[in-house]
Image: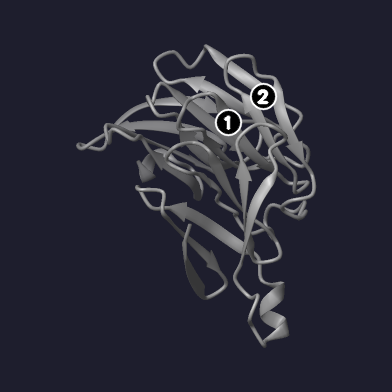
Amino acid sequence: MAEHHQDQVTAVTVSVDGTKFASGGLDRSVLLCTLPECTFESQLARCALPVRDLAFNHSALLLAVASDEPQVRLLNVTNPAQAQTLRGVEGGARTVCFDPLGQYVAVIGGDGALRVFDVDSGAQSAHRADLVGSRPDPNSAPMMRMEWSPDGQLLAVPNEQGQVLLVGRGAGWTVTRRLNSFANSSAPAAKDLPATVARFSPCGQYLLHACGRQLMLWEL
């Protein structure tokens, strides 16, 4: 796949069933490859600005594309011409992930806001501007990778304060718990580091998140 990109690769994702992966880059292209042979299939899209993140839905029929454009594209993998556009992501889309139940797509924009869109209608179901923290320059902003819990009831959202916020599904999308890496730290400088990645265990009972050089494991 590397030879098919003309510039740095900035995003990759693998389908849940392990049959395909997609990649995107600074060359603004989104490419599809089949596994396990790593056979190049097609260029699914070409964005107007660099690609920042990609995510398949659970069935791997849809691919969400986050780029520096103020929108997210939902591509039909078998027919990319059938694309849906989720608009209103100010500052460009930084990271994106599908709800495992197939109903929602969560997006963090360059303005630091969390937005949740309904997959079927494209309507915005939630807009939380107070969770992440803003870094408009995509080249200086850390890539904050959020994730849904396996049952789809919680969304783990890293923020600029080194925390991971567990956002409950629906009903106001409220923060049910804050996991603070440095709550007991005596190093003031450490508190300025953003959390960058949050990942649930397959059973949903544990969450691992990265913040600077620290890895924190939480029992939920």
Give the class, few, some or many, for how many residues have Cα within 10 Å of label 1's Cα (few <14, many ≥20). Answer: many
Of residue 210 and residue 204, the one placed in the foreground of this image is: 204
Q: Position of residue 27 (x, y in %)?
A: 55, 40
C-alpha gap between disc 2 and disc 1: 9 Å
**Point 63% across, 55% down: residue:** 177
Q: Position of residue 137 (x, y in %)?
A: 74, 54
Residue reaching furthest to the left: 37
Find disc 1 in the rendering and name its residue. 105
Amino acid of disc 1 = Val
Give the class, few, some or many, for how many residues have Cα within 10 Å of label 2's Cα (few <14, many ≥20). Answer: many
Asked whether residue 70 appears in the rendered view, the answer is: no
Note whether 143 is above or below 149 in the view shown: below
Asked if the residue under mark 1 is in contact with the one under mark 2, i.e. CB atoms within 8 Å, the reply is yes
Q: Identify the image quadrant of residue 195.
A: bottom right
Asked whether residue 130 appears in the rendered view, the answer is: yes
Q: Quadrant of the N terminus?
A: top left
Note whether 116 is above or below 177 in the view shown: above
Q: Can you tell which of label 2 and label 1 is closer to the viewer?
A: 1
Q: Position of residue 208 (x, y in %)?
A: 46, 61
Q: Is residue 93 left or right of residue 13?
A: right
**Point 52% across, 65% down: residue:** 210
Q: Position of residue 206 (x, y in %)?
A: 42, 57
Find disc 2 in the rendering and name its residue. 86
Of residue 99 and residue 33, the one placed in the foreground of this image is: 99
Q: How many labels, in total?
A: 2
Amino acid of disc 2 = Leu
Per the image, label 1 sits on a secondary structure element best described as: strand
Q: Which mark is residue 187?
A: none
Note whether 174 is above or below 98 in the view shown: below
Q: Earlier in the sequence, mark 2 or mark 1?
A: 2
